[in-house]
Image: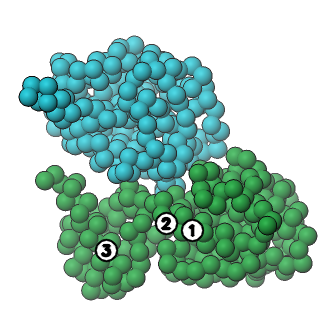
Chain colours: A green, B cyan
Amino acid sequence: MKTDDVEDVEIHLLLEGVQRIYGYDFRDYADASIKRRLTHWLAESGFETFSQAQAQLLRSRSVFESLLRGITVNVTEMFRDPAFFRAVREQVVPFLKTYPFVKIWHAGCATGEEAYSMAILLNEEGMAGRYRMYATDINEAVLQKASEGVMPIAEMQRCTRNYQKAGGRASFADYYTARYDRAMLTAALKKDIVFAPHNLAVDGEFGEMNLVLCRNVMIYFKPALKERCLRLFDSSLLPGGFLCLGLKETLERRKMGDRYEELAAPLRIYRKRYG
Amino acid sequence: MDSVDSASAAGAHAFRAVAIGVSTGGVHALQKLLGELPATFPLPILIVQHISADADSGLAKLLNDRCALRVKEADEQDEILPGTVYLAPPNYHLLVECDGFLALSADPYVSFARPSVDVLFESAAAVFGPGLIGIVLTGANFDGSRGLKTIKQRGGVAIVQDPADAEARQMPQAAMAATRVDYVVALAGMAALLQQLVARPGTIPRDKNGRDD
């Protein structure tokens, strides 16, 4: 048997074990990416093989926590895909403004960059205090980071450029305070966001949302888990609500696709039809 | 039976996909290489062309207009079909799933790139093994050399554009330094080589221009 076959078997057993001991189910994650992430984690962990790691993993919560951090971190940046945020500002916010109060679910928020981007955008459009954003992630360590709202100062230059391309109306520097090599986001951006743990593979829906945002999260899932997520989002959304996906994610070929109209064609902003 | 034997022998060596990595000078190189392949070319072709994160999908359209093969930007969960060319989208890695579908990832840069050639090559090698032909074309960096080595380790075939023929020679040179390459050819001969390989796998004498592992 070739080495890669052994490793595939090891990964299968490891994910099975993790599910049975810790309840976290990664068996429906797309195999190529989770294999890359697991291999990366293995190299950093000091274990020689997945079999060797498994013995510790199933008995030690802290080893499992390190694995969880390693394989569930999604990277993003503020105002990633500026054209998308510009379209939200110009085409979605006008609808949201017609409600006295709106609820937003940002699923898979990771370290919070896109949640804060959305908060900046909504505040600039005069919606401060008129929305609540539930920003969720499977990984509680990244949620802790997200709620602190502290980012490397080195990233601010690119974020500023994105912000301007996204139609930002102020000076981006007004939104953070520089401290040594870190940028601390202002408290005004945090007050309407609630960070909470949520696992898309096992947990339930959030009720009566006006906007659900889940970008570049489902690309890591196998088809069955993608369908589960989309059902969750669909049952969470009010009629007339908006669903925002990543630029390479689509409702085409999806069961629920015909209940949605695409608002901004290449930017994957969908609106749930009434009735 | 004779026919069964030859069929299974051919099956054991049959190629299942081509993976191409290219950077600086890639638009011209891809136009030339893909432009010389007929619509009947039977394998899927997966391509990582380094491209800026906010580029649009113009390259796929341009290549589609000028090639007999169908060229498209890869969407998540695209089925890998014969005779179709899939380009990695800007700002995403392109990977191959074990069920023969494509996957995308927004994971961090690998070899300073997203999409990264190494990511495509490594995941494709894991799935296609000896059925994969890996090609490194012109480029001014080192992405693809680690992945081409993996392709060779899994029994695939490695082709590199002759550095003297490449607009930027670093990427082909790095690939040749990393592994024992099977063919070092100019762009002009590459489409013909691919067609010969696909028609009669294993019958063409291989160059020995790369160093031994």
Dot 2, crowdedness within 10 Å: few (<14), some or many (≥20)?
many
* Dot 1 amino acid type: Cys
Q: Which residue is mark 1?
A: A229
State the image coordinates of residue A227 (x, y, percent, origin top left).
54, 64
State the image coordinates of residue A201 (x, y, percent, origin top left).
49, 73
* Dot 2 amino acid type: Leu
State the image coordinates of residue B182 (x, y, percent, origin top left).
23, 27
Q: Which residue is mark 2?
A: A225
Whether the residues at callouts 2 and 1 have beta carbons within 8 Å, the answer is yes
> Disc 2 on helix, strand or loop?
helix
* Dot 3 amino acid type: Glu
Q: Looking at the picture, do discs 3 and 1 lie on one chain?
A: yes
**Residue at x-position 31% and y-position 47%:** B127
Give the numbered dot on residue A16.
3
Query: Upstream in the sequence, badge 3 or badge 1?
Result: 3
Of A108 and B1, nearer the camera is B1
Of B183 and A188, nearer the camera is B183
Chain bearing mark 3: A
